Each structure stands twice: as C-alpha cells, then as structure tokens.
C-alpha cells in the first residue's frame, strides 16, 4: 500500500531515448501490453489506493483519458517515433520512480506537460527522506533540465 503520509509533490519524469533492457521481475510477475478489460483492473487498483471515490469514476477516467485514441497504441513504441514519453507521479510512489528510472525515465527539473506543475525541488527533498543515499544520488544524477 502507498504511504500517503509522504507529502504530495507533482513529480515529472520523461523518457526521450528508450533502449530495450532486460528487467528482472520477481517470480509470478510479467510485463504485458494493454488488452481490453484491463481498465477494470486499473480502476480497482486506483480505487483501492484512494485516488478515486468509486470504481465507476476510476474506470470512466481511464476510458476518457487513455482509450480515446486506441488507434495510436501501436505508435507508443520507439520504432514509431512516439518519444518523448512523460509520466506524472509523486514521492509516495518512490518505488515506481526507481523502476521508471531503471527503464530510462529521468526526473525533470523544470520540464512539465499537460496541466501539471513541476515541483522537482520539493519532490527531491521528500525522496531524500525515503530512499537510500545511493538511490538518491542515482535520481539526482539522472535528473535533467
């Protein structure tokens, strides 16, 4: 479960140059592409962590936000020129931030997208309280303007 006692700060990550990497996952886990019906599981997860007031609202958000341009799904791959890719996250998702970093995403010091404010400095202060010194240094070194 996410630790919601960690202060929320808009944290922006961007991947501009993706190279496929071998990622070791724990037994029983795998990475798969989106398939119809996954929006229901996404909605359950988002509702369970408190991001939405109901399953219906969560699923509606997914459909309206991510499924309006399904024809572009094949263009999400590097070979189709769909970079850069942005992620909006927050320090309480620090494990995801470390995962994204291992996949080539970089914390953005100033860049932003959509309507999100970039709160890099605040986010780094909070991340510094959570992650190991080695992990913090990695995040700091991989950050970009």
Image (tube, helix red, strand yellow):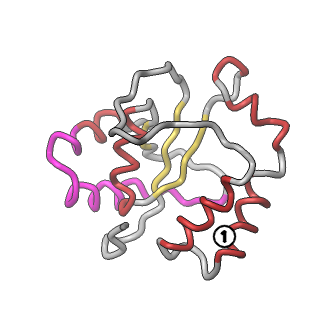
Is residue 115 depicted above or below 47 in this figure? above
Residue to which mark 1 is pinned:
58
Examine the image and state in which quarter residue 74 appears. top right
Q: Is residue 123 magenta?
A: yes
Residue 139 location, x and y as percent?
30, 41
Q: In x, y percent, where is residue 135?
A: 22, 42
Q: Residue at x 32, y 70 (%)?
A: 3
Q: Main secondary structure of the magenta part?
A: helix
Q: Residue at x 51, y 37 (%)?
A: 31
SS class of the residue under badge 1? Answer: helix
Identified at 61% across, 60% down, the residue is 41
Residue at the extreme bottom:
53
Q: Residue at x 47, y 37 (%)?
A: 30
With 82 as the anchor, is 145 left or right in this view?
left
Identify the image quadrant of residue 40. Answer: bottom right
Above or below: residue 107 compared with residue 103:
below
Residue 117 placed where, x, y %? 55, 60
Please indicate whether residue 116 sits to the left or right of residue 123 in the image. right
Q: In the displayed orientation, state which residue is furthest to the left.
A: 133
Report the magenta residues as a range.
115-137
The one nearer the camera, 92 or 139, is 92
Residue sitting nearer the eye, 41 or 3:
41
Is 112 left, or right, of 106 in this rendering?
Answer: right
Callout 1: few (<14), some (14-19), or many (20+) C-alpha neighbours within 10 Å?
many
Task: Identify whether 139 is placed above or below 58.
Answer: above
**The C terminus lies in quadrant:** top left
Compared across the picture, whether 78 is left or right of 111 comes to right
């Amino acid at each position: 479960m996410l630790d919601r006692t960690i202060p929320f700060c808009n944290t922006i990550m961007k991947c501009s140059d993706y190279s496929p990497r071998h990622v070791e996952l724990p037994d029983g886990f795998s990475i798969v592409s989106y398939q119809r019906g996954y929006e229901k599981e996404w909605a359950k997860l988002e509702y369970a962590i408190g991001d939405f007031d109901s399953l219906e609202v969560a699923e509606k958000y997914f459909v309206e936000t991510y499924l309006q341009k399904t024809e572009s799904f094949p263009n999400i791959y590097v070979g189709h020129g769909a970079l850069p890719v942005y992620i909006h996250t927050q320090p309480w998702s620090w494990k995801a931030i470390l995962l994204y970093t291992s996949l080539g995403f970089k914390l953005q010091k100033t860049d932003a997208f959509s309507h999100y404010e970039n709160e890099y400095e605040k986010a780094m202060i909070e991340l510094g309280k959570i992650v190991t010194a080695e992990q913090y240094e990695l995040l700091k070194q991989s950050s970009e303007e």
